[in-house]
């Protein structure tokens, strides 16, 4: 286990699901971890507040962004474009805003790790908002990896993961969705948050990985 004593990490989205699991694995390795979200007073759609909060944290080693799991579904012909824009503003622009604000404060050897989703590269009618914002994020991370080098910039792309993102569903419908997915996914299971956090940890620890998209999707993209 890598010793991260003396390292400082910010996990935006770190109060729930995948972000909370990333924060836990970094803290278990000795890092000082700041977990941020609206629950702690940080809304990534407020650029000025975000910049000033990040500047207050001082030098940082690792930035992880997992915020913004909600996006409207539906075919483009009838999609609520304002809702799609709001989802983009949190997840896509929130990621870019946070990276822009944090970059000047990242220490030598620093990393930025974003979180996309398997729909970035899977064509499923009715999923435009998720597909578009995750694809944009994956493409942008590769540009940032060159522009910010030697800061390393990567993306973890989860498949269906058992988190509070689905807390709004009826318990029975949620179970059915997870069971159905597990029965068709090559890995035979729906991911737990720590499975996905292992990808963020890999991106942070592996000194030669940058501009990469790490798929932790149970095989969804080969299905
Ligand atoms: N779970 C899946 O099946 C799955 C699949 C593919 C991709 N992903 C991606 O993985 C990432 C994490 O998903 P998750 O399942 O862990 O979601 P989650 O459990 O719903 O957690 C989302 C986190 O984002 C924070 N957040 C939301 N809006 C925010 C805002 N405006 N400003 C600051 N923080 C905000 C939430 O806290 P507050 O509400 O307190 O702000 C929460 O901490 C997301 O990008 C999601 O799209 C998830």
Image (cartoon, rainbow, N blue to C red):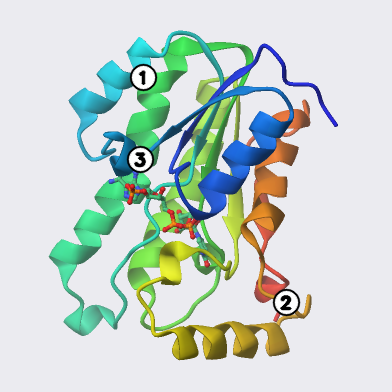
Does residue 9 appear to the left or right of 129 in the view shown? right
**Residue 190, placed above or below residue 54:** below
Q: What residue is at 29 percent from the left and 82 percent from the top? A: 74
The residue closer to the viewer here, 99 or 197, is 197
The residue lying at 46 percent from left, 89 percent from top is 173
Respond yes or no on whether mark 3 lies under 8 Å from ligand 1. yes
> Mark 3: which secondary structure?
loop
Q: Position of residue 87 (x, y in %)?
A: 28, 57
Say which quadrant the N terminus sits in.
top right
Q: CA distance from mark 1 to mark 3?
A: 13 Å
Q: Position of residue 150 (x, y in %)?
A: 63, 17
Q: Is residue 21 above or below residue 105?
A: below
Q: Residues within 10 Å of mark 3 (few under 14, many from 20)?
A: some
User: Residue 37's mark?
Assistant: 3
Give the CA distance from mark 2 to mark 1: 37 Å
| Sooner in the amino-acid sequence: mark 3 or mark 2 | 3
The picture places residue 201, in percent across and down from the top left corner, at 70, 38
Q: Is mark 1 within 8 Å of ligand 1?
A: no
Residue with the mark numbered 1: 54
Q: CA distance from mark 3 to mark 2?
A: 29 Å
Q: Looking at the rendered structure, which numbered label has been put on residue 189?
A: 2
Q: 10 Å neighbourhood of mark 2: few (<14), some, or many (≥20)?
A: some
Identify which residue is drawn at 64% across, 16% down.
Answer: 7
Element type where label 2 sits in the image: loop
Asked if the residue at tag 2 contacts the one at tag 3, i.e. Cβ–Cβ closer than 8 Å, the answer is no
Q: Is residue 150 visible?
A: no
- Residue 170 lies, in percent from the top left, at 39, 85
Query: For residue 28, what is the image quadrant?
Result: top right
Mark nearer the viewer, 1 or 3: 3
Q: Answer with the quadrant where ligand 1 appears in the image.
A: bottom left
């Amino acid at each position: 286990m890598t010793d991260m004593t003396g390292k400082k990490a910010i996990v935006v989205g770190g109060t729930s699901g995948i972000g909370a699991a990333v924060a836990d694995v970094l803290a278990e390795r000795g890092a000082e971890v700041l977990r941020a979200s609206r629950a702690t007073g940080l809304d990534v759609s407020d650029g000025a507040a975000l910049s000033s909060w990040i500047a207050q944290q001082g030098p940082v080693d690792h930035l992880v962004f997992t915020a913004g799991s909600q996006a409207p579904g539906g075919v483009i012909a009838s999609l609520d474009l304002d809702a799609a824009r709001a989802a983009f503003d949190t997840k896509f622009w929130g990621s870019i805003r946070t990276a822009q604000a944090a970059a000047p404060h990242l220490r030598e050897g620093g990393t930025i790790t974003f979180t996309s989703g398997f729909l970035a590269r899977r064509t499923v009618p009715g999923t435009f908002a998720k597909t578009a914002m995750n694809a944009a994020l994956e493409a942008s991370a590769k540009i940032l990896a060159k522009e910010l080098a030697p800061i390393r910039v990567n993306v973890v792309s989860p498949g269906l993961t058992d988190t509070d993102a689905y807390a709004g569903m009826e318990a029975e419908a949620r179970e059915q969705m997870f069971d159905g997915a597990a029965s068709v996914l090559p890995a035979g299971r729906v991911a737990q948050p720590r499975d996905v956090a292992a990808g963020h940890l890999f991106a942070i620890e592996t000194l030669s990985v940058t501009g990469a998209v790490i798929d932790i999707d149970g095989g969804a993209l080969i299905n």
